[in-house]
Amino acid sequence: MTDAADWDQDESAEDERDLAPREDDEAATTTVDWTVETVVSQMRKGRIDLTPNFQRRDAWTRIAKSRYIESLVQRYPVPQIVLAEDPKRPGRYLVIDGKQRLLAIRQFCADSNDPRDTDWLEEKIKLTGLTEAIKLNGKTYETMEEEYPSETMRFENATIRAVLLRKWHSQDFLYTVFYRLNSGSLKLSAQELRQALYPGAFMEYIDSYSGTSPALRWLLNKPKPDRRMVDAELLLRFLSFHMGIEQYDGNLKNFLDHTAEKLSTRWDAGAEFEVQAATEAMERAIFAAREIFSDKVCRKFSAGKFERSVNRALFDVQIHYLTDSPLRDWQVANPAKTVALFQELCRTDPEFIDAVSSTTKTPYAVYTRFNAWGTKLAQASGIPHKFPPAVPETLG
């Protein structure tokens, strides 16, 4: 199974090295102390962007959520949240840090009598695993309000400090803040922030489809949507190379951002159908890969065995050459030969290994890995290989 540590160590993932903040990049920063009651009101009014879809990417257990609620009841210090004002919608905020905490509050306070809370009722929290306010175990917000009014008042009046970022100049600034806030702890996927920066039907499709895709669930060995949105990132990554909205120039973050932005803009002008067709091609390719490689799909071969973790850079190339019908048919008809060719490539081509292991994001590395595997398949099958539209067929 692929775990968080494996993904964090994958050099072909996004990280802070992709960012290019301006020298004058800063924001007007305000610190406010909101009560829980105020935070709930802001979320209900849609001023804090915490959509119901995010529940599918819920990273906290019910015990973790309950203990956060307990901390607020007990007036324990809790971490601040960081919000960035949406420049297109003043007074509305994107969540940069603290989404899980806000989600816990939103689920606990969901009110069956408030139509704005309808989408949150299914995941409504009943407190569990409390160690201090033990009498509240098993209580919902309503039963706590009825049976323990003093604890309810302490909860509603508990203070949450919010840092508000206004007048920020670039999205790279927000990504920098995001990465720095998460350094030293479990690094979250930049895809989560991208979902907020490019709202709309396309990113909703990415979130919804990736979370239910049978192929991605099998590949990542996940029975549910990935908590860190690796499935959503892989789908966007595939679409970016496969559809070739623009040519890859070495900056992975910008490459994915620009694809998200342009497909969001073009969604109602035909992009929806192009994306659906491409996604179906990816599904077929992943299941074809399963026929050929079994559970070794998108894994590096080194020291005589396949590695445990899925490699994003290998995902790019193996899945691409399985979206090409003639090459897919040949590989499916010759699984043992295909696996042997891949093992030979890993053993004998150090440039290919470097392009999927350490230096993965330069244009040369991307060209190298697509060219190496494509050439290997073409030589064995006699079928010409084609680069994805986003990859230049020559580097000069």
Image (tube, grey):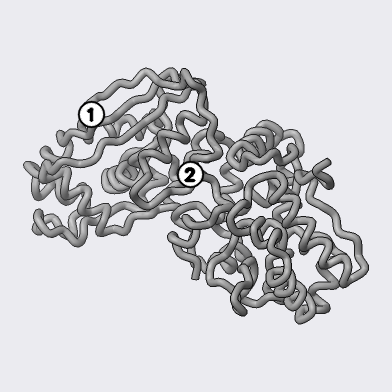
Q: Quadrant of residue 156?
A: top left
**Residue depicted at 28% across the width and 30% down the height:** 162
- Tell me: 225 left or right of 72: right
Q: Which residue is mark 1?
A: 34
Q: Is residue 297 left or right of residue 120?
A: right
Residue situated furthest bottom in the rendering: 336
Residue 59: image tag? none
Callout 1: few (<14), some (14-19), or many (20+) C-alpha neighbours within 10 Å? some
Secondary structure beneath dot 2 equals: helix
What is the residue that sits farthest to the left in this orientation? 150
Dividing the picture into quarters, in which one does residue 304 lie?
Answer: bottom right
- Which image quarter is the C terminus in? top right
68 horizontally vs 113: left or right: left
Point 54% across, 46% down: residue: 14
- C-alpha separation, residue under disc 1 versus residue under disc 2: 24 Å
Residues 84 and 35: in front is 84
Q: Residue at x 75, y 58 (%)?
A: 320
User: Residue 374, percent across and down?
Assistant: 81, 61
Looking at the image, residue 61 lies above or below residue 296: above
Please name which of the two marks, 1 or 2, marks the residue nearer to the observer: 2
**Residue at 73%, 64% in the rendered image:** 285
Q: Are marks 1 and 2 in contact (CB under 8 Å)?
A: no
- Where is residue 345? Give x, y as percent: 73, 69
The image quadrant of residue 295 is bottom right
The answer to whether residue 110 is seen in the rendering is no
> Against 183, is 344 above or below?
below
How many numbered markers are drawn?
Answer: 2
Q: Is residue 247 in view from this perspective?
A: yes
Q: Which mark sits nearer the N-terminus, 1 or 2?
A: 1
Look at the numbered disc 1 and give the secondary structure of its residue: strand
Query: In x, y percent, where is residue 330?
Result: 85, 72
Q: Which mark is residue 192?
A: 2
